[in-house]
Amino acid sequence: MPRYVQYTLLGKRRWGIASESEVQGLRGDLFVGDLQPEGDPVPHGSLALLPPSQPSKIVCVGRNYRAHAAELNHPVPQEPLLFLKPPSCLVGPNVSIVIPDSQTQLVHHEGELAIVMGRRAKHVTVAKADAYVLGYTLMNDVTARDLQRRDVQFTRAKSFDTFGPCGPWIDTDFTPGDQRLTVTVNGELRQSGRLSEMVFSPQELIARISRIMTLEPGDIISTGTPAGVGPLLAGDVVCITLEGLGSLSNPVISEES
Ligand code: ZN
């Protein structure tokens, strides 16, 4: 289960491969496929991890779990409901989500499985979709729910800086199946669902999205959130866990601090 992380060393972004307790630094680029070990392994805790990809775009999917569509009083979409988040919203594991208090009174967590594309994809079939995937990671599609309800478009509600925690790594061996995805806030269970409950599978999403826009290596597709979305407040710690993949944890602060 190779798990690739990114972090900064001497001002440069670099790749590493994470084991249980350590990260082995690598020379080269995962997307080029020329990675070589470099230097000695270091303990996880000594590195500040970055979001594991620098996408040209983050494509998100709304209401892709029936129970979540129901809790927001929406029907299940007949086709994937797509929207974009800007790459500028991305932050890595353990980096603070900043609540823009002056503009929103209701910020929600949305824990999601995210696909990281490995090859340029255009008009890909469902059967061939897996060949275009580099691996999987986790995404918190943080949302200002009051602004989402007020606006026709999702752009403002979904796009604040820090509203895209992503990580901790790209797992290149993970295969989505019936794994359970959960979200806790301060250790209390909020969201829970199984990947098998998705309305549109990852392969179906890649096929449908690649008919609209060319997906580039590193692009992220966030596959939607299970039921149980709820508010985030300054002082909270929100943690997404996916069986077989890992956990993504982020504290929450107010813009005033
Ligand atoms: Zn979402």
Image: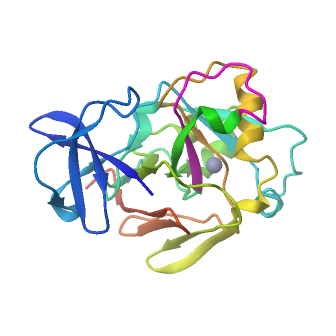
User: Can residue 115 be found in the magenta stretch?
Assistant: yes
Question: Which quadrant of the view contains residue 79?
Answer: top right
* Left or right of 35 in this view: 185: right
* Left or right of 31 in this view: 125: right
Residue 101 in sight: no
* Left or right of 14 in this view: 163: right
Task: Judge whether 96 appears above or below 25 on screen.
Answer: below
User: Can residue 22 be found in the magenta stretch?
Assistant: no
Q: Residue at x 66, y 47 (%)?
A: 223
Q: Position of residue 52 (x, y in %)?
A: 38, 43
Question: Which quadrant of the view contains residue 123?
Answer: top right
Point out the stretch of residues depicted in magenta: 112-128
Task: Judge whether 70 appears above or below 63 on screen.
Answer: below
Task: Judge whether 66 appears above or below 50 on screen.
Answer: below
Q: Quadrant of the C terminus?
A: bottom left
Q: Residue at x 80, y 64 (%)?
A: 67
Query: Which one is nearer the viewer's eye here, 172 or 246?
Result: 172
* Left or right of 138 in this view: 148: right
Q: Position of residue 153 (x, y in %)?
A: 68, 32
Q: Position of residue 173 (x, y in %)?
A: 52, 52
Residue 76 in sight: yes
